[in-house]
Amino acid sequence: MQLSPQQLKTNIQFIAQQVGFDDCRFSIAATSPHSDRFYEWLAEGTAGDMKWLERDPHRRVDPREVVPGAKTVISLALNYNPGEHPQSDYRIAKYSLNQDYHDIIDGMLKDLNEALAEMGGQQRYYVDTGPILERDFATASGLGWNGKSTVQIHPKLGTWFFLCELITTLDIPPDQAHPDRCGKCTSCIQACPTNAITSPRKMDARRCISYLTIEHHGSIPEALRPLMGDRIYGCDDCLTACPWNKFAALARETKFHAKQEIFQYSLRDFLTFDEKKFRHVFAKSPIKRIKLEKFLRNICVAIGNTGDVGDIELLQATAKQHGMLVQEHAEWAIKEIQTRQ
Ligand code: B12
Ligand code: SF4
Ligand code: SF4
């Protein structure tokens, strides 16, 4: 029996919930209404080292370029709110306190894709790394709205959720877009330690601590280092500031709950990590993606901002043991500590 478009929709939403997603909504596979903003952003050079964003930008703004004959984008949300964790002398973004979301969500999308294929659809599915403006299509589907921080806000989940999507040839009735509920609030813009949100819904990624600690490969610009404080992987300040997180519940997926083991270590402990230890502690974590050198670079910046003379000997030893990148940041940290004294 042929299912009606509305029956297809109800079935897909039911399966998405069974697979574990927290929300599932639909938009028409068409050019993003904000594609101009994306081209502008690229042209201004604010994407920094993320040259992969410049590859085939027309594909990123139009899902029909990715799946010929695509009719619908299915946007899905997965809550990652990791809950409370012990105190530490550093900060790591909430999304990376346990297992890598790419691995978890990929399996969930695979299940959903199989179900859609049985309904007669052809799909491509993505989480994070695919050629699609995930937040624009989530906005179009009414899943939430792009806040002034540029982060997608969900009326129930707040900011703590991942996005992913399936681009499908199935023709499914679209949902209504969600109204923008930021109102006069500017908390996220004020909370940003590096002024990376240059105006509402516009960011200079080169100033964002998430970019500097994760995506940026080389030396961190000296002017920005003091503003990074104790943040060693990602940044949550513009998310934490958002009042829409007031009722955000803990993630159902326990693999996102804060892994207590990470908090056994201090910044000084991290500085002594070698390849083997780094790979062991961050085995399933997204943190392993930045590799040891960049991790140590970030640790040096945090110690430079928060450490004391007791850290100098260890920083000197670290500078001797590692390549130019770590050496330069360790020497900077020593100077910062000495200046503070
Ligand atoms: C590149 C990237 C980054 C870069 C650049 C961030 C950025 N703001 O663009 C860096 C490394 C800095 C980054 C940081 C983070 N990221 Co990131 N990132 C991406 C990625 C891969 C592409 C984003 C992109 O295309 N940017 C281009 C710019 C131009 O897009 P934009 O800022 O969203 O601007 C658009 C809209 O604002 C819109 N627009 C403009 N004006 C208006 C007006 C209205 C009314 C509306 C509706 C829209 C609108 O037009 C613009 C063009 O499309 C996406 C995954 C994906 N494939 O989409 C994940 C993604 C956005 N990141 C994610 C996360 C979790 C983060 C961090 C929270 C991680 C952390 N804790 O450290 C931070 C948040 C920082 C922030 N304030 O955005 C999640 C966000 C989930 C959510 N709820 O929004 C995503 C979707 C990954 C995922 N699959 O879950 N990220
Ligand atoms: S993630 Fe941090 S640095 Fe980046 S825009 Fe938000 S508050 Fe600013
Ligand atoms: S902090 Fe305020 S302005 Fe920023 S995204 Fe949340 S509601 Fe919107």
Image (cartoon, grey):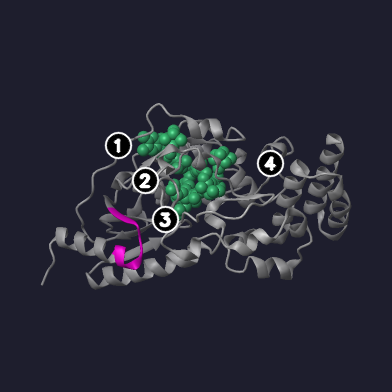
Instruction: Name the residue carrying label 2.
Output: 154
Estimate the spatial distance between the alpha carbons at disc 4 and disc 1, rounded to whole Å. Answer: 35 Å
Residue under the image location 45 percent in, 50 percent down: 160
Mark 3 beta carbon near ligand 1 (under 8 Å): no
Left/right of residue 173 with respect to residue 23 in the rendered view: left
Crowd band around label 1 with a 10 angstrom C-alpha radius: few (<14), some (14–19), many (20+):
few
Circle number at residue 79: 3
Q: Residue under label 4, please give it.
A: 229
Name the element at disc 2. loop
Q: Amino acid at mark 2?
A: His
Looking at the image, residue 160 sits to the left or right of residue 4; the answer is: right
Residue closer to the observer: 108 or 184: 184
Q: Quick check: is the Cβ at mark 2 less than 8 Å away from ligand 1?
A: yes
Q: Nearer the viewer, mark 4 or mark 1?
A: 4
Q: Point out the frontmost of discs 2 and 1.
A: 2
Q: CA distance from mark 3 to mark 1?
A: 21 Å
Task: Identify which amino acid the numbered label 3 is placed on.
Answer: Asn
Determine whether 126 is above or below 39 in the image: below
Q: Earlier in the sequence, mark 3 or mark 1?
A: 3
Classed neighbour count for the residue bearing mark 3: other residues with Cα under 10 Å, few (<14), some (14–19), many (≥20): many
Quarter of the picture containing the N terminus is bottom left
- Percent of width and height locating residue 63: 35, 53
Looking at the image, is 292 positioned above or below residue 189? below
Q: Is mark 4 within 8 Å of ligand 2?
A: no
Classify mark 3: helix, strand or loop: strand
Residue 301 % position (x, y): 74, 46
Residue 83, visible in the rendered structure: yes
- Which is more N-terminal, label 2 or label 4? 2
